[in-house]
Amino acid sequence: MPNFFGMETTEKSSYSKPPVLCTRGSTTEESESATKAKSDVKMEVTLGDPWTKTGNRQVPDMFAPPVFDGVHPDPETWLAHFRRYVDCRLMPEDDQLAFFPLFLKSAAIDWYDGLSAIQKRSTELLLKEFEQYFCPSPMDQVLNTESVFNRNQKPGEKVRDYVAAMQKLARRIPAVDEDLLKRMVLRGLQPQIKAFVLQHASDIHTVGDISTLAKVAEAAGIETTGANGDMAAVMEEIRQSRAEVRMLTNRLDRMSLNTVSQPSRTPNHTPTNNEIGVTRKRDVVLTRFTATESIEWYRFQRPCMTVTQISRASY
């Protein structure tokens, strides 16, 4: 008699186990897909856009430094921007050396092409060469018309902007310390603001103290009501004085023209020959003789004339 029980047990056990080949196939496909995904991710990180991604630090393109042409923008400002940019992106030194010439053009890229391989070997040496070639020296900073020694607060310029500009100029000259900078900042303030700050001289110890007091004066409107108001009043008085001077000048010109063109009020009189002869005769007598001598002379010439007639004839 056939054993149907064992057959059922065998068939049941064979059907109850999952297919081994199918299980291995699915596991292999999952592992391959996971490996491919990891490789894609790794390739994406490695071959990503070098301008926006380095390691785990992403930086938008708008924060990249502008292209430097040898003059614009300011070389010191551009160099500081480049250093901050590569530090923010955690860029290794090889990438810094590779990206540096991409930000240069015109005279700047010509300078870079003229450097030797030794000067391009390290970032520190390359940036030092750039600073020595393009950035002004400390002597140039001293002689510059916009140095810390002759910079003044401009009309309408905020105190905070003026102090920030002075601190930036002071960093360019190593010999300028905190005490000297404090004096230079105080010297360049607007006259009315400076007067307010000097009233609290005992409270001034740092540049920040000067900035705080100057901001108080600026918020109170001392500059507007003081210096600008007085200057506007002076300019208005000058304009009025000029108008009055023009009016007086025109009036004098008219008076002089009227004096020259006005006719004489005395009638014209032409002397006769007898009058001319009498005048000449009288002039000769008066120049040669005194009054007594002239009377005696008339008496000798004309003994018939009386003293009254002689006086009339003499004068």
Image (cartoon, rainbow, N blue to C red):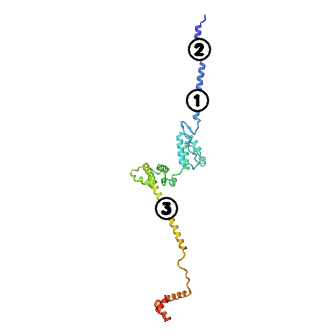
Is residue 294 visible in this depiction of the protein? no
> Looking at the image, is mark 3 or mark 1 earlier in the sequence?
1
Residue lying farthest top?
1
Asked if 41 appears above or below 82 in the picture, the reply is above
| SS label for mark 2 | helix
Label 2 to label 1: alpha-carbon separation = 36 Å
> Looking at the image, is mark 2 or mark 1 earlier in the sequence?
2
Residue type, mark 2 in image: Tyr
| Quarter location, residue 9 | top right
The x and y percentages for residue 23 are 59, 20
Mark 3 or mark 1, which is nearer to you? 3
Residue type, mark 1 in image: Ala
| SS label for mark 1 | helix
Query: In the rendered image, which residue does mark 3 sit on?
Result: 240
| Quarter location, residue 51 | top right
Is residue 295 visible in this depiction of the protein? yes
Residue type, mark 3 in image: Gln
Tag of residue 15? 2
Label 3 to label 2: alpha-carbon separation = 118 Å
Query: In the rendered image, which residue does mark 1 sit on?
Result: 37
> Looking at the image, is mark 3 or mark 2 earlier in the sequence?
2
